[in-house]
Image (tube, grey):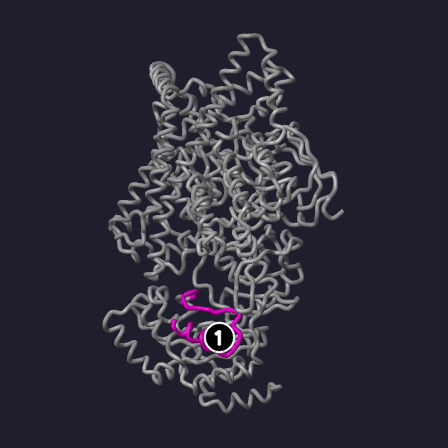
Amino acid sequence: METRSDSARAASKAPHADLVLTLGHGHATVETAGGKATRLAEMTGAGLPVPPAFCLTTALFDLFLRETGLAAEIRAAEARGADSRTVRELITARELPEPLARTVLAAYADLGRPRVAVRSSACREDAADRSFAGQHDTVLDVSGDQALLDAVKTCWASLWSDRAAAYRDGGAAGSIAVVVQEMVHADVSGVLFTVDPVGGRPHRMVVEACCGLGEGLVSGRVSSDFFAVDDRTLEVVEERVRYKVTKCASVTPGTIGMTKVDAADRDAPCLTGEQLTALARLALDVRAHYGTEQDIEWALRDGTLYLLQTRPITTRPRQTPREERHSPYVAPQPEAVQQGTLWSRMDIGEIFVGLMSPLGLSFARYYQEHVHRDCAAALGVRDTGDVDLHMGYLQGHVYLNISYTAHLLGQCLPTRDQRHFTSRFVSEEADLSTYENPFGTFPGGLEDLLSTLHWVRATATEMLTMTHRAEEMVTTRLYEFDRARRLDLTRMSRRELHAELTRYLGFFHDAHVGYMPYYINAFGFYGVLTELCGKWLGAEGDNLQNRLKTDMSSLRTVASAQEIWKVAQAAKARPRVMEIIDGSPLEEIAGRLRADDEGRAFWTAEMEPFLRANGTRSRQEMELTHPRWIDDPSYLFQMIRRYAADGFTVEDIMGRSRARAEGDVRAAVRALPLRQRRTLETVISLYRLCSELRETTRMSMVTSIWLVRNVVYEVGRRLVEEGVLHSADEVAYLDFEDVRAYLAGVRPAREAFPRAELDERRRLHDYHNRLPEPPLTFVGEHDPTRPARRGAGAAGGTRAEGSGSGTAGGTRLEGLGSSPGRIVGRARIVEDLVWQADEFQPGEILVTRYTDASWTPLFAIAGGVVTDIGSMLSHSSIVSREFNVPSVVNTKDATQRLRTGDTVVVDGDRGTVEVVESAEG
């Protein structure tokens, strides 16, 4: 067995041992070792806990280029205009000369030949005036001689990556070193900023921590905990612990991927108070050593902290305008309007709910400016008002201006009384005891008469044409879907891609305008139904309208669950297909099915028709960054596994105890006097019709967004190739108007998408992600630094400090009972639908922030549903009623106060959830 001293002697005898530095021993400079290696050497020399590492100097790289003749080849390639990819391929295809290879491997032996992280260390990165962080490559969990040599060449080649070339903006490539560092298979990783890089509050060190490797945090693929530490006292002054479902880790030797966080760790803080204090002390040492604020990457393994790298913070916090931070208005308003407006994000189609990316927000703004006015006109509103007042934006969330919308809807007879509209969008955060609409009521007199006549004509036309329009929308949707599937956007010129986007935006406009009357009319008839049930049926009418059952075979959203069940049965009948689905990683199932004869037949016969009908669904559908089922069918395969394994029948999927519920309704209605019965039956019929048409045409709206997303991500692909974006993840930081301008040929790529603006949007998005989630409803302005009422400051999947310690039996939550019935069951918190679908057991109580159409298949096996957000007409309420599942929505903070494993009673009639036995006993 080779000893460390033996390997050290071998390293000293290597042909070019002088071109390798053991970090912490010998002098490293930026010119010889690059920025990253130099800082690691400095930290090691200062006695800071840095994993052992060595550096292949820039001189060794330059020698490699000379001895292989690559220096001349690269100059020639660049002279004839070859792209960066050509240069990279020249480097990675060339073998290291034997003396150089022996030198690298001798240093590796001296390190003890552990699994290593191989990181580039360019001369120009991590400088105080300009950080090149993320421009060059890192290869993780490398083991073995050949793998190490290949990883080194990959890092060398990244000096010519498109993103590095774009970032240096025509400057010379210079040289590059490579750090080979012992791999830390971290239990917890993260970053620490010695000064708040966005919020700008003094004496606050900011810590972001995630389970597993830090690459998941950097790429934005995992949830992280947030801590703020006072740099004077080292006390934790702020803590937000998120529910963490996934982590980045070594899934097989040499392969880094996503895997699940252990259930016990999901809602626990990543770091203890003692660990945070120890980390903060190390950060102060690093800051003192360099004399400037630092961005530090760290890892924790078996209770030991390691510093992986540090760099100066190259940007300073930017203060956002006061009205942007506290008011959703996009432009300043008179004081009475700004302070008196009622804002809400409750149940605005569920497509806007939650924090949105900069791309998603800019697309919502496009909708506001180009579509929403015509949606209002489609409702029979004669004066559609100022489009800038319809919607607003706060902390990365989209809000509907309830005051202004109620003012405009005063032109329509059913909403002449503003309370009918306003009451639906008010949650307990807002105190309306003194509220008065700052826009007043819509003018009376001639204007009122003209508006009423206009609404009557529009409504009559709508009643006559709505069924035919829905049929046309379905036909158009399928045509556009099939056409898009035949196109290859990658082969289109920029001008052709612009024409395609223009076409899709036209369809987007028409689909939303066509859908809006069904949505609002279903809401209106439901309100009338509620009033009549309460007035004519007395106690029997309490929640009776919830038991009305739309024909489920016509309700598109619910029918998707039935269709997944049918696909699952077809897969179950083909053993080879189920073998592939059960035995393959989720991300590989589709490819393996299409590569297998029997799998390909199954895909054509079963998956393709299902995806044509349902494939453009996803969560938070106005958010363009979210892949649709057709883009990533992982969730579908999870549900196929579940439906195939658990022996569900079609009756289970079609609805439970449905006949009993409908019988209750029919008996109560038959007991009414003839006139009342006929009136109620008419309202029920209209509500049923509008509900069915709403769900049928919703797919047109959803598909139109998918079409736009396809073009945006094709633009993103091209920007990555050109080096404008570092990766496809950065599509989230594009502005939709910049995408339109770029495709229209107004500006070239690097001018249309300047790096400074992308970085600023990312910083602001990260800041919004750190803040407590803004309230569902509020009047005037909202200051995120002020204490919130219950639920108002509850971030999605976030437990406030101290709330992660368990839930005592007897805890009681109140919300809105939206589907009747009472059930006792085991709670399961679901934050990530794709990763947790296979964990959900039949009969469990689904507890989540909110749901949309993509969640429907879980309802078929749920015993009950509890959500933080919702209303009587939100998705979770409608689908719970269709499946006859007790449901309580709008609890504000069920995901914080309940824990997976708690035994709870869900009472959909009273709107309560009570813990009868905690998960911890």
Which of these two is toward me, 94 or 738?
A: 94
Does the rendering let one see residue 323? no
Task: Decide: is 566 above or below 13.
Answer: above
Query: Does residue 466 lie above or below 292 as drawn?
Result: above
Q: Nearer the viewer, residue 920 or 388?
A: 920
Q: Is residue 370 magenta?
A: no
User: Residue placed at 34% from the left, 84% from the top?
Assistant: 66
Is residue 154 covered in magenta?
yes
Left or right placement of residue 670 versus residue 728 in this view: right
| Location of residue 697 (image quadrant) | top left
* Residue 12 visible from this viewpoint: yes
Judged from this view, the residue extending furthest toward the right is: 921
Task: Give the image location of residue 19, x and y in percent.
Answer: 44, 85
Looking at the image, the residue that sits furthest to the left is 80
Instruction: Residue at 62%, 47% (x, y): give it.
Output: 800
Q: Which x, y percent locates residue 324?
A: 43, 43
The N terminus, quarter of image: bottom right
Please give the residue where the numbered disc 1 appears in the rendered image.
147
Name the spot of residue 674 as percent of width and height, x first.
55, 8
* Three-letter residue code for mark 1: Ala
Quadrant of residue 61 within the rendered picture: bottom left
Crowding near the residue tagged with mark 1, few <14, some 14–19, many ≥20 C-alpha atoms within 10 Å: few
Q: Look at 32% across and 49% down and name the residue there.
A: 738
The quarter holding residue 393 reads top left
Between 697 and 367, the one lying in front of the other is: 697
Report the span colored magenta: 133-157
Residue 888 lies left or right of residue 21; in this view the side is right
Q: How many marks?
A: 1
**Residue 759 drawn at (x, y percent):** 41, 57
Q: Is residue 450 left or right of residue 358?
A: left
Q: Residue at x 48, y 58 (%)?
A: 219
Q: Is residue 882 above or below residue 591?
A: above
